[in-house]
Image (spheres, rainbow, N blue to C red):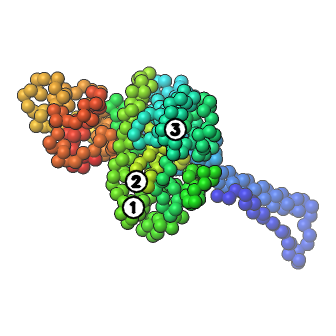
Amino acid sequence: MDYSQKIPSYNFMYNPPQHRRSRGPGKLITAASVVLGFGIILTILNIYELHKMKEDHMIHIQPATEGKTGTFGSKQPVVWVEGKHLGTGYLKHVFTVFDRIGYAVGDSESKWDVLWSHEYPFETLSKKLADLKPHQRVNHFPGTGYITNKVSLATSSISYIPKAFKIPSEKDTFLKYTQQHPEKLWVQKRNSHRGIKIKKIKDLDLANDGSFVQEYVDKPFLIDKRKFDIGVYTILTSIDPLRVYIVEGEVLLRFCAADYHPFDPTNTKKYVVDDNYTPVWEMPSLKNIYDDGMYTCKETLDTYLEQTGCNHLKLWEDIKDSIRQVYLHKEKELISSSARFRNVRNFFEMVRFDFVLDDQLNVYLMEVNMSPNLSSGHFWRNKRIYEHVVYNVLSLVGVAKSTSNAFEDSDLDGKDMSASDKDVTVFPMWCTERKCLTDCQSEKCSICHQCLNRDTKESFKHAFMEHINRGTCRRIFPKPVKQEEALKWSPATANEEYHSLNSRNKKMYIWFMGKCRLDPGWCF
């Protein structure tokens, strides 16, 4: 709304009839008072309208102490959105989605149900998060800095990450490697991720503490002569046992602002995607697919790759595999960081994994963003992507629930309506055998209802509800399988990947196998 519009002026002119005599001073004063009073009333009304317009504009950032009570006595849930300079609107789409799913907006002092914090909250808000109630949810996991920290990630020795060296601690190892690979190009980075530029080895600052040098992917896959990256929105819903999803229905495609060739390392617009990137709808080979065909960014990319004879199916399998590797590699740190909290089910987290491709469609993970940009300030057409992502994340983790008892744990009948013990029972052929009725020690029997403790049952019920509410999100860990594979699977014939899992991850893996056996819709 435009609040700069002037308040309409109102002119009142009193023209007495010519055939009547002039009024006396008292009557003139009375008439003037009436006109003045009427004018004051109109001015007040205009001020009130402007105030209402301002309220409408600011409604998203006005705190409520607690949610309103609905028609049938259910409490309106409350979200506390935390971030610097919220009035600038960079979290507008987060507010919008919460508003649409029925949330009131609160603050740190309100009886909040969900905290959406733009910053990592476990330092600045540690006191507020020290004693969370079972129904409260927070949009970050303790310890995710081990994944989103650029130095920590780049030097993880994960196969999909370009080789990197910590500086200055690995300076000598780096120099030895460059002697063996003199043709390699390098970039130097810090956690701030600003000022990236390809440099010659002699121009690198190898005394810069806290930085790292990383191999540059020098033969990128180009579309319309432009390098680009792929942002994959990833959701961590549980640790120990580990569950990870991606928003399968959409990705963020960002193209460099300048053509890659003729290559010039001094012109970063040729190889660095910055805030002023070129969007998908401005790329000649993609805009018709995206706009006229009404396809998503992911579908647009898949269509282009298929039209040009490229294997986009392998591309996505590699992307999913790289995300799995990252979480498994950092799992111990996540578990350790969460140990001080009474219940890790209070937490969920959405991050964005950014990838580039080389000219052979090999996948390279460049970074993971803890609080990815959700503002359409640069490109208003990204509004749909951001709101789609936020809504599907909130649906997946049960924040966008429709049942009246969504936020309190006291209604056991309501919980059973959503996910009961019968909903999470699997492997009937195994679990009705005499052995499993009397012995819970074997891996096959450990998954049976009579062998499950309360905590494990709750983990399975949470996994059940995530699957029911997943929208366009799809599970990538535990790894999806085909039903024919699940029907043949048993712990005795499992591969090395299964045996490398910890005990809680094994149980979750077996459970998903059991659900897949019963219903192919659970296989992915």
Residue closest to the eye, 1 or 8: 1
Give how far across and how far down residue 473 sits, in percent. Answer: 37, 48
Q: Is residue 129 left or right of residue 463?
A: right
Count the labels in the image: 3
- Marks 2 & 1, CB-CB < 8 Å contact: yes
Residue position marked by numbered label 1 in the rendering: 305
Q: Which of marks 1 and 3 precedes in the sequence? A: 3
Residue positioned 46% across, 29% down in the render: 142
Residue positioned 45% across, 25% down in the render: 337
132 w.r.t. 249: above or below: above
Give how far across and how far down residue 245 sits, in percent. Answer: 37, 43
Give how far across and how far down residue 395 sits, in percent. Answer: 39, 46
Give how far across and how far down residue 235 sits, in percent. Answer: 41, 41
Q: Quadrant of residue 324?
A: top left
Residue position marked by numbered label 3 in the rendering: 178
Quadrant position of the N terminus in the picture = bottom right
Q: Is residue 362 left or right of residue 145?
A: left
Q: Is residue 21 left or right of residue 477?
A: right
Which residue sits furthest bottom?
19
At label 2, the amino acid type is: Leu
Residue position marked by numbered label 2 in the rendering: 361
- Marks 3 & 1, CB-CB < 8 Å contact: no
The residues bearing labels 2 and 3 have C-alpha atoms spaced at a distance of 25 Å
The residues bearing labels 2 and 1 have C-alpha atoms spaced at a distance of 10 Å
Local SS, label 1: helix
Local SS, label 2: loop
